[in-house]
Image: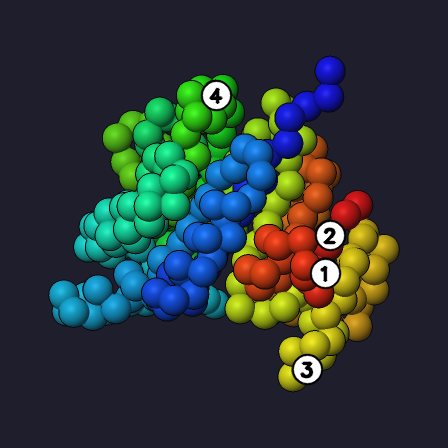
């Protein structure tokens, strides 16, 4: 029997920060056919809230250092403010959403990142996705909405990269479903020329990826995203799409599709 399809969609902080963009995205997400999971970050909102509370946000190469105070802010902002706001908006669109951290239903366990050149603090690297537990929620008719928080199984919450959560959940769920991943951000896709918004590379496979790396076209923030993508494809995920939110409609074909 063929596997049912499951879409796993990730949205970034720029969409979350803009109420109009968020509402437009959630409308598109709610009209996606079939089983679906939403993953969101909220870093910009967390930085803003931290500064209101007089807590300085420290970043190293775009990744947040999460000390105990910062973890409290992240838990409040990701798990509370942002997550519940999204869940409420989805309910208004007749999607029976359920907001989760990785600790809920023991869905995503992580281990604290070891200290090497940098001590990232309470940051987790995903160890296990309890796909059967998540599937129980889907089977019961719920749409899971994960924020970027996991736990270590010993009572400690951990800040975890939302892109990584998306790919690890997609890998885990591919044991039961034919999974497709969607990374929604403000660009139209992976660009050949960062200064030309329309220079979208529509299809990237392993060979072209190697070429793009050689030519230095893929660099900076796009590197970890694409590494995640190919890791996911090598571990059972069917297709990955990257681009702006309009790729969730059938009308738009101007985005990047990634396959092996």
The image shows a total of numbered marks equal to 4
Mark 4: secondary structure: helix
Q: Residues within 10 Å of mark 2 (few under 14, many from 20)?
A: many
Seen in the picture, residue 228 relative to 186 is either above or below; the reply is above
Q: Which residue is mark 4?
A: 139
Q: Which mark is residue 112?
A: none
CA gap between label 4 and label 2 equals: 28 Å
The residue positioned farthest toward the top in the image shown = 1
Disc on the earlier residue, 1 or 4: 4
Q: Quadrant of residue 222?
A: bottom right
CA gap between label 3 and label 2 equals: 20 Å
Q: Residues within 10 Å of mark 4 (few under 14, many from 20)?
A: few
CA gap between label 1 and label 4 equals: 31 Å
Q: Is residue 109 visible?
A: no
Mark 1: secondary structure: loop
Q: Residue at coordinates 42% horizontally, 21% vertically from top-left?
A: 140
Mark 3: secondary structure: loop
Q: Residue at coordinates 47% horizontally, 67% vertically from top-left?
A: 61
Q: Nearer the viewer, mark 2 or mark 1?
A: 1
Q: At which x and y percent is residue 57?
A: 28, 67
Q: Nearer the viewer, mark 3 or mark 4?
A: 4
Q: Quadrant of residue 87?
A: top left
Q: Which residue is mark 3?
A: 196
Q: Which residue is mark 2?
A: 258
């Amino acid at each position: 029997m063929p596997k049912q399809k499951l879409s796993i969609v990730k949205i970034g902080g720029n969409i979350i920060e803009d109420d109009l963009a968020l509402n437009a995205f959630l409308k598109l997400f709610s009209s996606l056919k079939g089983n679906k999971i939403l993953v969101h970050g909220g870093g910009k909102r967390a930085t803003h809230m931290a500064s209101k509370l007089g807590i300085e946000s420290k970043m190293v190469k775009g990744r947040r250092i999460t000390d105990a105070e910062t973890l409290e802010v992240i838990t409040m902002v990701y798990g509370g403010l942002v997550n519940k706001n999204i869940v409420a908006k989805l309910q208004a669109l007749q999607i029976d959403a359920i907001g989760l951290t990785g600790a809920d239903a023991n869905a995503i366990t992580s281990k604290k990142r070891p200290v090497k050149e940098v001590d990232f603090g309470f940051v987790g690297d995903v160890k296990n996705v309890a796909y059967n537990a998540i599937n129980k929620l889907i089977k019961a008719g719920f749409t899971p909405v994960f924020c970027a928080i996991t736990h270590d199984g010993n009572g400690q919450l951990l800040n975890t990269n939302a892109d990584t959560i998306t790919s690890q959940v997609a890998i885990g769920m591919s044991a039961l479903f034919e999974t497709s991943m969607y990374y929604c951000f403000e660009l139209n896709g992976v660009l050949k020329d960062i200064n030309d918004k329309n220079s979208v590379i529509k299809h990237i496979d392993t060979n072209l990826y190697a070429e793009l790396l050689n030519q230095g076209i893929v660099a900076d923030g796009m590197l970890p995203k694409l590494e995640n993508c190919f890791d996911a494809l090598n571990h059972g995920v069917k297709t990955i799409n990257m681009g702006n939110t309009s790729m969730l409609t059938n009308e738009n074909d101007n985005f990047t599709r990634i396959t092996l």
